[in-house]
Image (cartoon, rainbow, N blue to C red):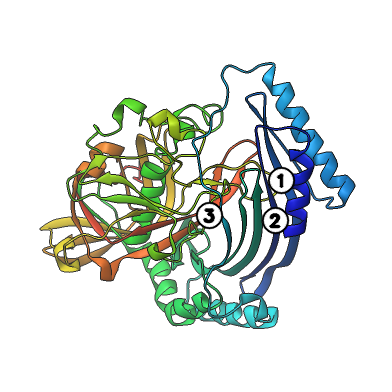
Amino acid sequence: MKAIALAALDAVARRGVAYADVRAVEIGEREVSTKNGRPGHVSSTESRGVGIRALVSGCWGFAATDDLSREGVEAAAGLAIEIARASASARREEVRLVPEEKYEAEWVSPWSIDPFTIPVDRNLATLLAVDEELRRVAGVSLAEASMHFERRRQVFASTAGSLIDQTRVTSGAGFSALSYKQGEIQRRSYPNSFGGQYQLKGYELVEELRLLENAPRVAEEAVALHGADQCPEGEFDLILDSSQLGLQIHESIGHPIELDRVLGSEANYAGMSFLTLDQLGRLAYGSEMVNVVCDARVEHGPGLGTFAFDDEGVPAQRTEIIRAGRFTGYMTSRETAATVGAARSNGCMRADGWARLPLIRMTNVSLEPGAQTLEEVFGADHAIYMETNRSWSIDDKRYNFQFGCEIGWEIRNGKRVRMLKNPSYSGITTEFWNRCAAIAGREHWTLWGVPNCGKGQPEQVMGTGHGASPARFRGVRIGSAYAKE
C-alpha cells in the first residue's frame, strides 16, 4: 500500500499543485448474525483503493479509484486536478490551510486476539447459543444476535512530506430480545441498542461482554415490560445509564461542535448548529460539573474514534469542548481551524473509505467522570431511571430533542420501586445539560461505540466513541413520547 500511495502522490504532485495528499486504503470486514435459531447474515468483504485530494487555484479537487494499476492511478490524479480547476470558476474565496508538521510513522492499534483468526463457525456457535438462551424465556417472539469485525489499513502521503501507515482493528457484538403481545412490541438489548458494543479491540471484546451470561436477564425484562406500568408524564428528576447518555452526548454535543456544520456544510442535508461562532468561550453549555472532551488518543481508551493520525496527517489530540460548563472548543480541520483563530487543526478529519473525501467527524466525545458515587447519583427522593436507547429525534440545529428508552424504573429514596415501560424524555440541549446534578465516578465510566453515524453527501457512515458514567438531571420533561391517548 505504501508503493501505491507514493505512486499516486507522485502522479498528482508533478502536475502542479499547491498541496496534495493521498490515502491508499485496504479494508476487510466480517459480519455474522443469527435470528430465531438460524444464521441470519454471514458475509466477508474486502476493498482496496486510493483517494487523491488536490489543492489547485485555491480549490479542492478529489478523485478516487479501485484500479490500482499505473494507468488507473494516473487517471485519478488527472481527474482530481481537473475537478479543482473547474471548481475555481465558481470560487468565492481561496482555501487556506493552517500549517502542520510532516510525520513519518507506523502505528497498529492494540488487540489481544485477532478476530479474523476465529472461524466463522465459532462465531455462529456463540451467537446461536445466545439465541437459544433468549428463546428459553416464554414470551420472547424474536431473538437476534450479531458480531462485526473490521481491519483497516491506511497509508497517508502528502506533498508536505508525511508518510503515515496505520492499521486499526475494531470489533462489535450484541443481541436483542423482542416480545410481542396484544399489539405491543417490547424490546431489550445488550449491551447496547443498534448492534451492541463496538470498540477498538480484537475478539477479546466478545469474551469481555459475557453475552451468554446476560441473555436470561435481558429476555426476562423484555417479556416483563408488558406487565409494567406506563411511564408517567410530568417533570421529574431523570437518571440515565451510561449507554443512553453516550447517545445524548453524540446528538446534543458531538454534532453541534462539528465546525464544518456550524459553517454551513451540512445545511442542505442534516442541518447546521446552534453553536454559532459568537458562542465560543461564552455559552454556559451545562452546569459546572459538566466537562466534555474530544479525545482521539489511545490514552482515552479503545474507542471507535481512537487513532494515531487523522486523514489529513494531523496527530490525535485531546481538546476540551466544555470545561466547568463553559463551551470552549469545536472540532476542526486544517481548513476550518483558522476561522476560530486556531493555530492548527485538532485532528478530526476522517473519511469512511478510500472513495470519499475526509470530513470533520467526531472522535471520542466524552463526558468526564464526576465526583459522585453511584449511590449519590441515585439518591433522589423521586426520579425516573432509563436504560438503553429505543428512539431519538433532534432538530436540524441540535437544540430541541426527544429520546425514548427501552426500559425505565421509578426511583424512590434511592431505590428502584417499579419497572416502567415506554419511557421517554425531551428537552432543549443547553437547558438539559445545565440541569446536570450528579455524575458517577470513573469506576462506572464506559467508552461506548456508535458504529453508524451518518454525515455528508454522498453519505458517509463512521464509527464514533462516547464515554460516560450514569448521571442525574433535575426537572426534565418525561413521558410524552409513548403516552397513550
Q: Is residue 128 left or right of residue 7?
A: left
Q: Picture coordinates of residue 445 (x, y %)? A: 31, 65
Of circles 3 and 1, the one toward us is: 3
Quadrant containing the C terminus is top left
Quadrant containing the N terminus is bottom right
Q: Is residue 172 left or right of residue 414?
A: right
Q: Tell me, for residue 109, which label it has, or none.
A: none
Write down the quadrant of residue 51 in the picture: top right
Circles 1 and 2: CB distance less than 8 Å?
Answer: yes
Relative to 113, is 267 above or below?
above
In this figure, which residue is indicated by the disc labeled 3? Answer: 309
Residue positioned 62% across, 48% down in the render = 161
Q: Camera-side residue: 243 or 415? A: 243
Q: Tell me, for residue 25, which label it has, or none.
A: 2
Residue positioned 24% across, 57% down in the render = 471
Residue type at mark 2: give it: Val
Q: Camera-side residue: 352 or 194? A: 352
Q: Picture coordinates of residue 363 (x, y %)? A: 46, 52
Q: Tell me, for residue 51, which label it has, or none.
A: 1
Residue positioned 60% across, 79% down in the render = 128
